[in-house]
Image: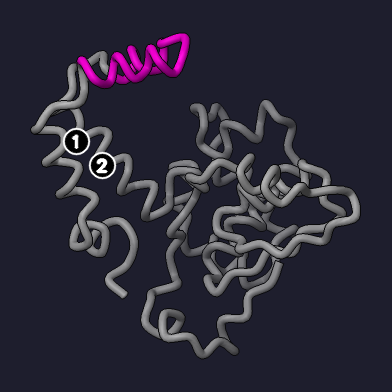
Amino acid sequence: MSNESGKMRSEIAQTMALDKVRYSQVWEDHRVLSEGLAIGPEDDVLSIASSGCNALAMLLAGARSVTAIDMSPAQIALVELKLAGIRSLSHEDFVPFMGATDSATPRLSVYEQLRPQLTPTSQAFWDTHHEDIEGGVIHCGRFDQYLRLFLEKHLPKVWPADAAEHILDAPALADQKRVYDTECDNEEYRQLLRWFAGKEMIAMSGRDAA
């Protein structure tokens, strides 16, 4: 992993705040990358680090090596922490530490076990972001919190309470479409989505004004 933010001259790198995790999960399908690139054992892959999900997925797809770069020290710190957890924790301990389930062990105590594996820059980042660790780092991203706001605060106003469950329980794509068409696709939802996914809202709450 590499962070070259000090050498970059791009306009966005100079204007966007880089002191917070923006993406704690990747929202694109890793299979599109792995299958589209036809990754094999002789491939050395260069990837944007982001939250690390796709970079790690390409390793699992069989790449010889993956080099993850990012202009954001916060994203590099997140990937380093995930890697430290993968190397040192059992699956049963890793999942709750990340925040996918409740954790019986205080997450900060787990972080202290992992901290020596991080670079000094990433240690300094997480040492000042304990609240993100306590809440589970897969939830700390600005964009992830933006989507959660939509899911928890706004969507219940325009969808029936069990609509999402009906979609997820549908056995086939055609059944999912039928549920969406009959239960979810209403004018109030469309107006809400246009507003929430609009440029102003995304700049203010989802990504960055820059």
Cα separation, mark 2 vs mark 1, equals 6 Å
Q: Residues within 10 Å of mark 2 (few under 14, many from 20)?
A: some
Position of the N terminus by quadrant: bottom right
C-beta proximity under 8 Å, tags 2 and 1: yes
The relative height of residue 184 versus residue 111 in the rendered view (above or below) is above
Magenta region: which residues?
A: 164-182
Query: Residue 89: percent from the left, percent from the top?
Result: 73, 37
The relative height of residue 93 versus residue 15 in the rendered view (above or below) is above
Residue drawn at x 46%, y 81% as measured from the top left:
13
Query: Residue 45: percent from the left, percent from the top?
Result: 76, 60
Displayed quadrant of residue 202? bottom left
The relative height of residue 183 versus residue 3 in the rendered view (above or below) is above
Task: In the rendered structure, find residue 153 and report the number of the disc placed on it.
Answer: 1
Please name the amino acid that badge 2 sits on.
Leu
Residue 65 among magenta residues? no
Position of the C terminus by quadrant: bottom left
The answer to which of 149 and 155 lies nearer the viewer is 155
Q: Which residue is mark 2?
A: 149
Please name the amino acid that badge 1 sits on.
Lys
Task: In the rendered structure, find residue 181 and report the number of the disc placed on it.
Answer: none
- Left or right of 168 on screen, residue 111: right
- Left or right of 36 on screen, residue 149: left
Element type at mark 1? helix
Residue drawn at x 56%, y 81% as measured from the top left:
5
Element type at mark 2? helix
Query: Residue 58: percent from the left, percent from the top?
Result: 72, 48
Displayed quadrant of residue 199? bottom left
